[in-house]
Amino acid sequence: MRIPLTILILTITLPIFGQTVPELDRRNGFKDIKMNSSVLDYEGLEYKKDIADGYYPEAKLYVAKKGYYENIGSLKIYDLEVKTYRDSVFQIIVVTDGDIYKGLKTAFGEPEFHYRSKFHYWMGENLRLSYTAPRKNRLELKYESFLMREKLKKDKEEVVEAIVDDF
């Protein structure tokens, strides 16, 4: 009796773990800024500086120009940063009022919680949206692309192959 009950419980609970959020993949970014797209396609973003990202070499930081990306509905956006690798968007960080949680929950469902890093997140096939509260009444949303990591791996493999071919 225990074995069939165990199998029944596993059959019910296993699909719950590792579920993705199709709506997150469908939107694929924040407002009109899409993950893995060229940052040069967005007139509302301007280059700020080269950054030292631990994972992506040659990363660049773009920020919103004045008059662009200033709110989400009636909520004020305090900061918007777009990080790129070879002009392709791999990360978007948005800092806004803390009242946006209900909207996120409606759009993407109940978030998961990462216990080690202490942040909530939604996971899609191609990206992750996480949020933390850096200060009272502020919420930091972070969109991260998985596809860009695959592109980076391919770029590194090409560099290694080019070195091997030189021998």
Image (tube, rainbow, N blue to C red):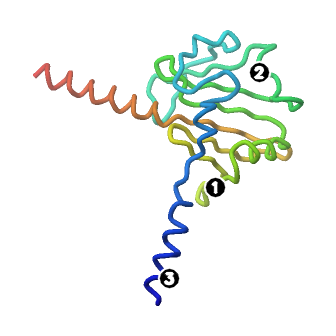
Q: Does residue 88 appear to the left or right of 47 in the view shown?
A: left
Tag 3 residue = 5
Instruction: Tell me the CA gap for discs 2 and 1.
Output: 27 Å
Q: Where is residue 75 shown, x and y percent of the image? A: 86, 32
Front residue of 165/73: it is 73
- Of label 2 and label 1, which has the lower sequence position? 2
Front residue of 165/145: it is 145
| Residue at the (48%, 23%) spot, across then down | 85
How packed is label 2: few (under 14 Cα within 10 Å), some, or many (20 or more)?
A: many
Mark 3 is on which residue type?
Answer: Leu
Check whether the beta carbons of the residues at disc 2 and disc 1 lie within 8 A of each other: no
Instruction: Tell me the CA gap for discs 3 and 2.
Output: 52 Å
Q: Does residue 100 appear to the left or right of 40 in the view shown?
A: right
Tag 2 residue = 69
Instruction: Tell me the CA gap for discs 1 and 3.
Output: 27 Å
Secondary structure under tag 3 reads: helix
Furthest residue in direction right, as rendered: 74
- Of label 3 and label 2, which has the lower sequence position? 3
Q: Does residue 162 appear to the left or right of 145 in the view shown?
A: left
Q: Where is residue 19 shown, x and y percent of the image? A: 55, 53
Tag 1 residue = 112
| Residue at the (84%, 38%) spot, across then down | 97
- Of label 1 and label 3, which has the lower sequence position? 3
Mark 2 is on which residue type?
Answer: Tyr
Q: Residue 17 lies in what quarter of the image? A: bottom right
Disc nearest the viewer among 1 and 3: 3
